Image (cartoon, grey):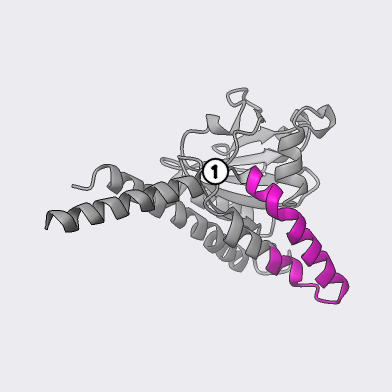
């Protein structure tokens, strides 16, 4: 019996160590390794007439390479001057990457308002803008006031790594579901619904898509809590 227990303990220890090594890979490092191949294959298929291949390759890149990586402590600024780096956000967070020229999807703002009210006690919502501070403030006024507003001014050219990784390699608009330990659980292109679609239907669709990411975060945080306090 002692031998079996020892084997199980050893196996669990090795498994945990391997997982830790995998999960400790930074998001920017993994993206740097695999993005060029993703871009090459996606562009090749697009020129061959498969215009949906970009979406398929993006999802594969996220599912196979980027999920489970650790969000870099990117340098950012917040309009309230309380945040200087991504890791200054201590709660799990839902990060939306936008620029002032983007138009939020039909139903998105209303869905976010509901979700912020439902989950802001344990989850932070953050909007990262690739603009000057004034433009970020102006754009963010249409969002719920509890959403943290971050910005990176491209013209200042001081945050090259942040810009290159989050904006230029992944595109806009996208959203990232990030745990309290900064593990990335999902990255997705934001739902885009045409303005002609009925507002209630659009809200329901946006709510559902964002909720799926929030549920991933809830499960992860609950599992961490159980691991720390199993009984």
Residue located at (86% from left, 76% from top): 48
Relative height, residue 182 to residue 66 (above, below): above
Where residue 69 appears, x then y in whole percent? 55, 48
Q: Nearer the viewer, residue 15 or 108?
A: 15
Q: Nearer the viewer, residue 158 or 7?
A: 7
Q: Nearer the viewer, residue 192 or 8?
A: 8
Q: Residue 128 sits in which quadrant?
A: top right
Mark 1 residue crowding within 10 angstroms, few (<14) / some (14–19) / many (20+)? many
Please state if 67 lies on the left or on the right of 119 as rendered: right
Relative height, residue 182 to residue 104 (above, below): above
Residue located at (28% from left, 51% from top): 10
For the N terminus, the quadrant is bottom left
Query: What residue is disc 1 on?
Result: 70
Relative height, residue 85 to residue 41 (above, below): above
Q: Farthest residue to the right: give it.
A: 47
Q: Which residues are magenta?
A: 28-57
Report how many numbered discs are placed on residues in the image.
1
Relative height, residue 198 to residue 145 (above, below): below
Q: Is residue 50 magenta?
A: yes
Q: Which structural element holds mark 1? A: loop
Q: Nearer the viewer, residue 1 or 77?
A: 1
Please state if 170 lies on the left or on the right of 146 as rendered: right
């Amino acid at each position: 019996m002692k031998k079996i227990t020892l084997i199980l303990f050893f196996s669990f220890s090795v498994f945990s160590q391997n997982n830790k090594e995998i999960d400790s890979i930074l998001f920017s490092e993994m993206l740097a390794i695999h993005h060029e191949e993703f871009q090459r294959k996606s562009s090749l298929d697009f020129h061959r007439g498969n215009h949906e291949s970009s979406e398929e390759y993006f999802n594969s890149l996220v599912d196979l390479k980027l999920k489970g990586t650790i969000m870099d402590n990117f340098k950012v600024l917040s309009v309230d001057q309380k945040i200087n780096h991504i890791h200054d956000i201590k709660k799990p967070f839902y990060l939306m990457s936008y620029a002032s020229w983007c138009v939020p999807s039909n139903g998105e703002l209303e869905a976010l308002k509901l979700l912020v009210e439902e989950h802001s006690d344990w989850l932070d919502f953050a909007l990262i803008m690739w603009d000057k501070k004034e433009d970020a403030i102006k754009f963010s006024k249409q969002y719920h006031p509890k959403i943290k507003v971050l910005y990176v001014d491209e013209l200042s050219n001081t945050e090259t790594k942040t810009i290159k990784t989050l904006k230029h390699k992944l595109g806009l608009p996208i959203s990232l579901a990030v745990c309290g330990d900064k593990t990335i659980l999902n990255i997705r292109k934001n739902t885009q619904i045409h303005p002609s679609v009925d507002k209630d239907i659009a809200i329901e669709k946006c709510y559902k898509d964002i909720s799926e990411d929030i549920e991933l975060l809830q499960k992860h945080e609950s599992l961490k809590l159980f691991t720390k306090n199993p009984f």
